[in-house]
Image: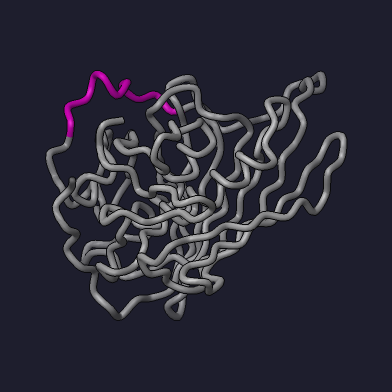
Amino acid sequence: MTNQPFFTRDRDAFIPTPVASGPWDPNSLHGRVIIGLLAFAIEQRHGADDFVPARLTVDMFRLPTLAPIEVTTKLIRDGLRIKVVEADFYSGGVNMARASCQLLRKTQNPQGRVWSPPNWDVPAPVDIAALEDPRLGMNGKWTVRPIVGAMGTLGPRRLWMREVRDLVENAPLTPFVRVAVAADFASPFANAGDQGLGYINSDVTLYLHRLPLQEWIGFEVVNHHATDGVAIGECFLYDQQGPIGTSTVAALAQRKPMVQPAPPR
């Protein structure tokens, strides 16, 4: 991609670029790049073609600044059928987030039929006009093709999303990193209301039964509930072949308003 990536490299450190900033503080990182970078490190160091990263959970317990980032990983279980990896995200030398990833070896489905929700029946991204609203793409962090509803509308919400930037300079997006970067979108898409987005998510859990085959990731809001300022939101995820998994988030009511992001570069 020709757009500025979210991170450059300096030996073992990842250096955030200005476009990596988030919506709550212009000097902090966006959740999508935190999740994506943890997935990137896990896949680079522990991934294998015959394993599927079936679950990635990321706890984001501090808001990282734009300081240099280091990611450490630890192989907890290296079995024939199951691998478990933990990863820690350090910003300016301080632990700001942690991930756990479970990788499952590919095999064959057992015989018999099991009920599943029906596939969504929606137009392909190429058949939908681009939405020229820079707020929805955080001024150049991604692009979308809306299907039904919109951020904060009271009703069904579906859209296609595509990345427009590499996560790390000179490292093309892999299918796992692509969907990991996108997964954070479940929080604003599921949790925004008619008064805007009032929740900041503290985690993301991404479940995948397979990796996406194309660039476009489909989001369908299937759940939002909140009590006493604690919310959960969930989206089904798709590619153009059908369902690939889910993205679920926990979130806290946020008193601080979102900032207007800087123009894209």
Considering only vertical position in the picture, is 91 above or below 118?
below
Task: Tell me residue 137's x, y (percent).
Answer: 23, 46
Magenta residues, start to end: 120-130
Considering only vertical position in the picture, is 78 above or below 153?
above
Horizontal side, residue 135 vs residue 208: left or right: left
Q: Nearer the viewer, residue 20 or 218?
A: 20
Horizontal side, residue 235 vs residue 101: left or right: left
Q: Farthest residue to the right: give it.
A: 80
Residue at the image position 70 percent from the left and 31 percent from the top: 48
Main SS, magenta residues: loop
Q: Quadrant of residue 208?
A: top right
Q: Quadrant of residue 226?
A: bottom left
Question: Total number of numbered labels?
Answer: 0
Task: Tell me residue 181's x, y (percent).
Answer: 44, 45
Which quadrant is the C terminus positioned in?
top left
Considering only vertical position in the picture, is 38 above or below 110?
below
Q: Is residue 249 magenta?
A: no
Task: Tell me residue 128's x, y (percent).
Answer: 22, 25
